Amino acid sequence: MIFEQCYLKKKRRKIGLIAILAVTALLLTSCGKAELTDKTKSDSEGTTSFADTTSDPDTGEQKAVTTLNAETGHFYDCYWDNASERIAASITYPYMHLSEEDRKTYPKLEQALVTLMQERKESRQELYEEAVRSAKETPVADPEHPPFYEVKEKVTVRRADSRVFSLILEGVADTGGTHGQPYTIGAVFDTEIGERLKLTDVVTHEGLFFDSVQEQLEAFWDKDYLYEDLNLVRFLQENLDNLAWVLDYYGLSIYFQPYDIAPYASGVQNITIPFASYPELINEKYLEVPKSYGIEFTEEKPFFFDVDGDEKTDSLTVSAAKGADDNYEAQTVTLNGESFKEDTGIYIIEPMLLHTADGKNYLYIGQQYPDDRWVFEVFDLSKGTIERKDIIYSGRHNIIDYEKEYFARQVLSDPDNFLLDTYTQMLGTAYGYDSYRVGADGLPVQEHSWYTICSETEITLLKDLTVSVVGEDGKEVESTELKSGDKALYYRTDGENWADLKLSDGKIVRVNLNNKDGEWTVDGKMLEEVFDGVKYGE
């Protein structure tokens, strides 16, 4: 969810309208805080190469390695140029937190993440000031193609468990000059102590590390992309403390910056050193992983993982649709050189891999529609092929704190227990959430037969109405009568036939609704004749 805060003067009517529409969309799609239910237990055996338990140093008891829940968002601001009537510069920077429950369990890690996000904010704002200065000082020579300056950074969570929390920060800084400068930064934390790790805290043998990087680079990158006179070992020796690296559940990944080992035109190169291939290379503590987990990764760059369990590294790349008209390129999923192209028309995507306890791997591609709604397109990769399963009309759960102006979405780090938001048109328009797990076919399985409404809306009865009282489990308890003038909160709905209201005394009552030719009725009366305060999105 984008929280747009572009400060504009009165005459900037066009951008003012955009801001109003953005806020309207934000309010419509906002969800309140919600605690996850207890984690789903599974009898399935994992297929990872390493144990998912560790011993308590005091008692010697085995403790399971468990996933953590996190939430991420970003802030957007922009500079409007009056002379050319356009946005001439913009800034986007990320923020993130652990879930409310995990903040209490791992306070040092939470503080380390808060500190990192504050550092990223301050450094991006400094660059943004340079971008704004360039926008003000650079004349617009070509009105059809005016210069645009951008400082943009996003965060993806690569691993979140009780051993390691790691993330990738990727961005571009275009503050003037020939072209923008893309970059990648890795940040890896020991979850228990909350300290950011150095590469030498994880890698136990320098020489073996150099060899493994060389091997993976030769396996997955054509040497024609690299400098002809590249001495990789020397580069690694001289830059060991400055490498961008990250741990996930499969291996140790290294990201090379533009000009590091290849010309700018070759883009960014990255490799992954599999744990299973080099178990003696990595600190044993960080080899332990849960049986099931989710990994966020970024589009365009190869993501390396063993998707079919054959103990060989697969290369997966996901690219959003881009361009228009004759230059339009379809959304593409490429696995080991084989591509699946689809004319989605969606330009903003979020790919993630969900690994289940039975060893299967599913690609979930979050896709943002032009009206700000998100959906998931699901693919099964477990057979080493790209098998499209379905589109799920739900998105990552929104976490909103209006007082702190905090707007974030939950990371799908646990395939056995995550929240999704679903758009509903029952009793007005709203978003509702529920808990899910990845089912045997790879698609989300909903825990309940209803959605809890994200932002509870107060409505007022205009007519007397006989309703059923139901418990939290949804079972009918008794009948009761609501009186004209009574107030209630829109609490939950099945999205098709009924809506539950919560009364001031805590009771939950169920209202049956019918839809005919697009018109909603209650007891044969039009919805607006029965309730006041029903809200509809613009």
Image (cartoon, grey):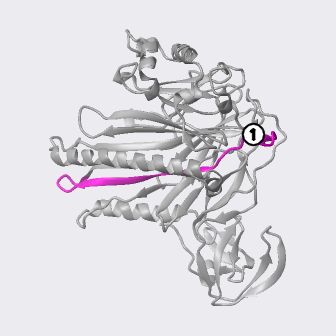
Tell me where residue 499 appears, x and y as whole percent.
69, 71
Drawn side of residue 517 relative to residue 187, left or right = right
Query: What crowding class fits label 1: few (fewer than 14 Cα within 10 Å), some (14-19), or many (20 or more)?
Result: few
Say which quarter of the image contains residue 384: top right
Which residue range is magenta in the image? 57-86
Q: Is residue 527 visible?
A: yes
Pointer 1: what residue? Answer: 57
Q: Is residue 324 visible?
A: no
* Foreground of the two, 451 or 494: 451
Say which quarter of the image contains residue 66: top right
* Foreground of the two, 304 or 510: 304
Picture residue at 37% right of the left edge, 33% below the top? 182
Tell me where residue 466 appears, x and y as whole percent.
75, 84
Tell me where residue 110 appears, x and y as whole percent.
56, 51
Picture residue at 23% right of the left edge, 65% below the top? 11
431 over 346 or under it: above or below: below
Does residue 59 show up magenta in the picture?
yes
Q: Amino acid at mark 1?
A: Pro
Does residue 427 show up magenta in the picture?
no
Q: Secondary structure at mark 1?
A: loop
Picture residue at 17% right of the left edge, 43% below the top? 138
Drawn side of residue 386 relative to residue 224, left or right = right
Say which quarter of the image contains residue 519: bottom right
Picture residue at 56% right of the left edge, 59% below the top? 399
Q: Residue furthest front?
A: 58
Tell me where residue 276 appears, x and y as whole percent.
68, 22
Q: Residue furthest top?
A: 229
111 over 353 or under it: above or below: below
Give the total of numbered labels: 1
